[in-house]
Amino acid sequence: MSPSTSTGGSKKSGSGGGIRDAMTPGRVAVAALVVLALVFIFENTGNTKIRLLIPEVTLPLWMALLGMGVIGALCGAYFMRRRK
């Protein structure tokens, strides 16, 4: 076959690039973990004391958990970007 007539496998026929292509099992698992983490964070609404070296602050536990989750996500994104 000549290159102009072969399909080459670069595109699937009939693939519209819709939601089915975007929803891989890995993305579904990550989305489920994010939902579970958010439920856990917002169920823990009591105040807590947090001490970082010298200052001691009192804030809702959900805010501390959410902050740590964001910091963890940023660190993970940074290291994944460096790997490529």
Image (cartoon, rainbow, N blue to C red):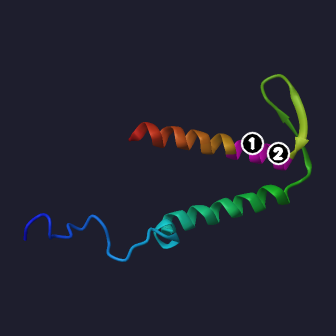
- Give the alpha-carbon distance from disc 1 to disc 2, as whole Å: 6 Å
Q: Nearer the viewer, residue 3 or 76?
A: 3
Q: Residue at x 24, y 68 (%)?
A: 9
Residue 15's x, y, as percent? Answer: 39, 73
Where does residue 32 sit, x and y in percent of width and height?
A: 63, 66
- Picture quarter with the C terminus: top left
Q: Assess whether residue 78 is covered by the magenta stretch.
A: no
Q: Would you say the residues marked 1 and 2 are in contact, meaning their CB atoms lie under 8 Å apart?
A: yes
Disc number for residue 67: 1
Q: What is the quadrant of the N terminus in the image?
A: bottom left
Q: Quadrant of residue 10?
A: bottom left
Vertical order, 14 against 43 (above or below): below
Please report the residue visible at 83 percent of the width from the left and 50 percent of the height from the top: 62
Query: From what the image shows, is residue 54 above or below residue 77?
Result: above
Whole-percent x, y for residue 70 in the image:
68, 44
Tag 2 residue = 63
Q: Amino acid at mark 2?
A: Met
* Boundaries of the magenta span: 61-69
Residue positioned most to the bottom: 14
Q: Is residue 63 magenta?
A: yes
Residue 83, given in percent of the width and then of the height, sits at 40, 40
Dot 1, crowdedness within 10 Å: few (<14), some or many (≥20)? few
Image-based side of 48 in relation to 21, left or right:
right
Residue furthest to the left: 1
